[in-house]
Amino acid sequence: MKSMLLSEAVECCERWLAPERIRDYDGARNGLQVANRGRIHRIAAAVDASLTTVRLAAAAGADLMIVHHGLFWSPRMPWTGPNYELLRALLDHDIAVYSSHLPLDAHPRLGNSARLADALGWRRPRRPFFFDQRNPAMALGVQTTTRIDRAALVEQVGRAVNGPVRVIPGGPAVCRRIGIVTGGAGGEVALAAREGVDTFITGEGPHWTYALAEELGLNVLYAGHYATETFGVRALAEKLAGKAGVPWVYLDHPTGL
């Protein structure tokens, strides 16, 4: 059975994603979050690291999880109750956890935004999009110039994410400049408008963005936080598995959010 050293797998991910270039939220803790005994034979990709997905990884026989949302967004103390069960599941099944948040959003080929753009048929090269205050020199998304009816775009996005799309029809009925930032970027509709798009595709956003999008003349498509962020972990797991010559599996545990 083929395998790869865990240290080699981490080195590959760090080289491909270059997490040191991106300033992330403190709780993201990009990189190896949990070690194992040192080798990987099967990789599991999941959007979220949780007790449920760890158990799914164990059932799949995986010894490395690649996730977008890692374990440490809030303090995991004390190690009792569900925290204990999570730790025990990881150790009992010798599962390592590698997490990549904003680096996997922003990657021009493996990233969530780039892969969603691929699924929508956007041709390369595509322009960078969404330079936020945290990373003013690094685009977290992509944009394209095209011409498509808003209703047709909504159908396209729904097929790409295999789920419903909520629409704020604040912009033109024919979309000409469209930007994507996956996940929870809806609170930044003003930033999207400042960067010149007439249509903004993201995962989710707060209630007040409806009125703001109307005032800004911006279409907003909320396609689901989970649904828009399944792309990057699958791409990274597939690339690493190909490098290692080991199998991989995607653990689908949708939140509906």
Image (tube, grey):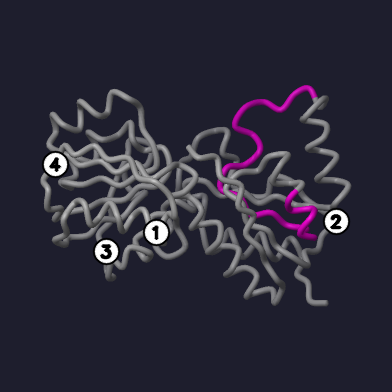
User: Viewer-proximal residue, 24 or 154?
Assistant: 154
Q: Which type of secondary structure does the marked residue at label 4 adopt?
A: loop
Q: Residues within 10 Å of mark 2 (few under 14, many from 20)?
A: few
Q: Position of residue 30 (x, y in %)?
A: 58, 46
Can you say which quadrant of the picture contains the N terminus?
bottom right
Q: Residues within 10 Å of mark 3 (few under 14, many from 20)?
A: some
**CB atoms at circles 4 and 1 under 8 Å apart?**
no
Q: Which residue is mark 4?
A: 171
Q: Which residue is mark 1?
A: 160
**Comes first in the chain, label 4 or label 1:** 1
Stretch in magenta:
56-78
**CB atoms at circles 4 and 3 under 8 Å apart?**
no
The image shows residue 100, relative to residue 134, as above or below, that is: below
Q: Is label 4 or label 2 in front?
A: 4
Q: What's the distance in space between the residues labelled 4 and 2, CA to CA?
A: 53 Å
Q: Position of residue 212 (x, y in %)?
A: 20, 27
**Comes first in the chain, label 4 or label 2:** 2
Name the amino acid type tagged 2.
Answer: Arg
Membership of 86 in magenta stretch: no
Q: Quadrant of residue 166?
A: top left
Q: Which mark is residue 126?
A: 3
